[in-house]
Amino acid sequence: MAAALLLLTGCDDDVIDKPPHLVKRDKMITVLVDMHLAEAVYQTKRFSSEELNKYSESDFYYSILHKHHLADSVFEKSLIYYCNKPKEFEKIYTRVVNRLTELEQEQNEKAKQPVDINQTIE
């Protein structure tokens, strides 16, 4: 997310032209949610997992872009474009935060479920 934060510093620049391959708003939300989740995993597990130490934070970002079939340049240009539209960018990030909150609540609910001791483990 460090790269995204650097891009955010340009939010006060003049409005830029719409890039030819703009990432659609809903897809941008999905990608940003995935990036935040990956960053959370990386930041919380990197010191306790030898396997994770083989990778850098940017490896996670690139894997997410690959998962969504996005070139890094397309993502960056789209992020810059949305950043230059503060109201639109706020709407996008409101949905990102809402989705992350929903996922957290789902995990909390799963954790509260009683364990069925009669269930067999495969």
Image: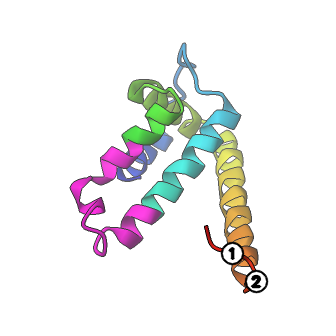
Query: Could you say whether the residue bearing mark 1 is in a helix, strand or loop?
Result: loop
Residue neighbourhood size for the residue with mark 2, other residues' Cα within 10 Å, grouped as few (<14), some (14–19), many (≥20): few
Quarter of the image where the C terminus is located: bottom right
Residue nearest the observer in this picture, 104 or 2: 104
Q: Residue at x 31, y 68 (%)?
A: 46
Query: Could you say whether the residue bearing mark 2 is in a helix, strand or loop?
Result: loop
Q: Residue at x 77, y 81 (%)?
A: 113
Residue nearest the observer in this picture, 57 or 45: 45
Quadrant housing residue 82: top right
Quadrant housing residue 15: top right
Instruction: Judge whether residue 74 is colored magenta.
Output: no
Instruction: Give the numbered dot on residue 28.
Output: none
Is 114 displayed left or right of 48 in the figure? Answer: right
Give how far across and how far down residue 117 sits, in percent. Answer: 72, 86
Task: Specify start and end residues of the magenta stretch as a single range.
Answer: 41-61
Question: Is residue 107 positioned above or below 65 on the image?
Answer: below
**Outermost residue toward the top in this view:** 20
Is 43 displayed left or right of 82 in the figure? Answer: left
Q: Residue at x 76, y 76 (%)?
A: 109
Q: Which residue is mark 2?
A: 118
Question: Is residue 56 positioned above or below 18 on the image?
Answer: below
Give how far across and how far down residue 75 sits, in percent. Answer: 48, 31
Give how far across and how far down residue 64 sits, in percent. Answer: 47, 41
Q: CA distance from mark 1 to mark 2?
A: 6 Å
| Residue type beneath disc 1 | Thr
Give how far across and how far down residue 90 sits, in percent. Answer: 66, 49
Q: Which residue is mark 1?
A: 120
> Residue 17: in sight, yes or no?
yes
